[in-house]
Amino acid sequence: MLILGIETSCDDTALALVRGTDEGVKILNAMLSSQALAHAKYGGVVPELAVREHLKNLPMMTRHFMAESGVPWNQIDAVAVTRGPGLVASLLVGLNFARGLALALDRPLYGVNHLVGHLYSGFLAKGIKPQFPFLGLVVSGGHTLLIRADADGDFKRIGGTIDDAAGECLDKSARLLGLGYPGGPEIEQRASEGNRNQYAFPRSMDTQENYDFSFSGVKTSVRYFLEKHKEQISDPKFIADVCASLQEAVMTILAKKTVAAALNLGLKQITVGGGVACNRRLQYLLQEACQDHGLKLWITPPWLCTDNAAMIACVGWMRGREKRASELLCEADPSLRFNE
Ligand code: KG4
Ligand code: ZN
């Protein structure tokens, strides 16, 4: 099966062609147009701007992408598109474009949940694929979720953030620190020069017997801390130490609770997806703990951790494999939950 995936839920316009076989999915080609620069000067995503960019880019990109892929249109077996969660107008651009393609090609359309895309990004890694059941950590700018996946579509929320997402905490803290957007990569870069034990930022809900997270307190503590140390904010060493200590607080709690959940639930495999999964400190902490406990960990390559269309096509392939009915009339849902 050859699936065309389309992703426009936030500020990236992305396309991918994946081939699904009995052995799993393989990415044939992928293309992404990032709007990061366009939004950077506002310190976050501006929905109006995102929609205009998607409208401008998607048709041109698709034509270019298909020509570059060398795949005739009639070989596509299904179209998969993100239908939520995300910015509603951005979602509508992708969804309506995909609907038009599916109609013109007379192929099924699958409306995909972006969070399931991140959950399945481990299937896109080369080599041995994860097997159900597994525990998935989805950790991005909008979400922090621990999901038990027993089969395709059979998901249970084990835990998640009760306030800010981990990426959101990093993005907001970066802003306070005078760093650029998105904040996660900037903080990681500064952290590499800093001492992670220099300052103690809170590790919220650490002692609680559940798998929930809270990151808004971390961000607030960064704000108070910076107000107290105003005179040092122009010192690169100070910023590096704050970044390293902040990164440590966030990543330690993510890794600790994820591994505890897998152990307590008797799940032997963990997948990690979403933009924050690019973070090398998080990867290291997870790798170490998984090794200690005999758990198998799938770390998705960085370009597939952040938003991409291959993960959307991968979900479409799972649906197509089960011969699920076309969802031509599916609606965009900005607040779609992961098990809807
Ligand atoms: O999955 P994603 O591309 O978009 C959402 O669906 O949110 O994730 C973006 C988030 C941003 O908050 C960004 O700061 C964070 O992922 N991020 C990182 C890193 N790269 C991206 N956070 C920590 N370390 C990184 N290297
Ligand atoms: Zn995402």
Image: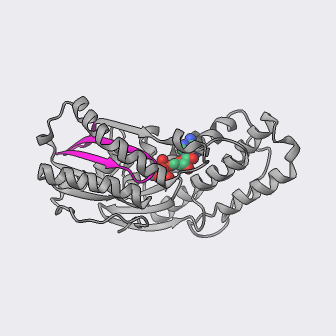
x 70%, y 57%: residue: 219
Q: Is residue 70 left or right of residue 264?
A: left
x 11%, y 53%: residue: 106
Q: Indicate the colouring scheme.
A: one colour
x 67%, y 66%: residue: 207
Q: Nearer the viewer, residue 44 or 202?
A: 44
Report if residue 238 is visible in the image. yes
Residue 180 magenta-drawn? no
Report if residue 272 is visible in the image. no
Which of the image's four quarters has the N terminus? top left
**Number of marks:** 0
Q: Is residue 10 left or right of residue 95?
A: right
Image quarter for residue 323?
A: bottom left
Q: Nearer the viewer, residue 325 or 99?
A: 99
Q: Nearer the viewer, residue 7 or 62?
A: 62
Which of the image's four quarters has the C terminus? bottom left
In this rendering, the answer to whether 266 lies above or below 8 is below
From the top left corner, tell me how far across and down residue 54 is, in percent. 38, 47
In this rendering, the answer to whether 218 lies above or below 273 is below
From the top left corner, tell me how far across and down residue 17 is, in percent. 26, 40
From the top left corner, tell me how far across and down residue 169 is, in percent. 63, 55
In this rendering, the answer to whether 313 lies above or below 126 is below
Image quarter for residue 242?
A: top right
What secondary structure prevails in the magenta region? Answer: strand
In this rendering, the answer to whether 261 lies above or below 235 is below
x 81%, y 37%: residue: 234
From the top left corner, tell me how far across and down residue 189 is, in percent. 64, 35
Residue 7 magenta-drawn? yes
Q: Nearer the viewer, residue 9 or 248?
A: 9
Which residues, given as a range, are shown in magenta? 1-28
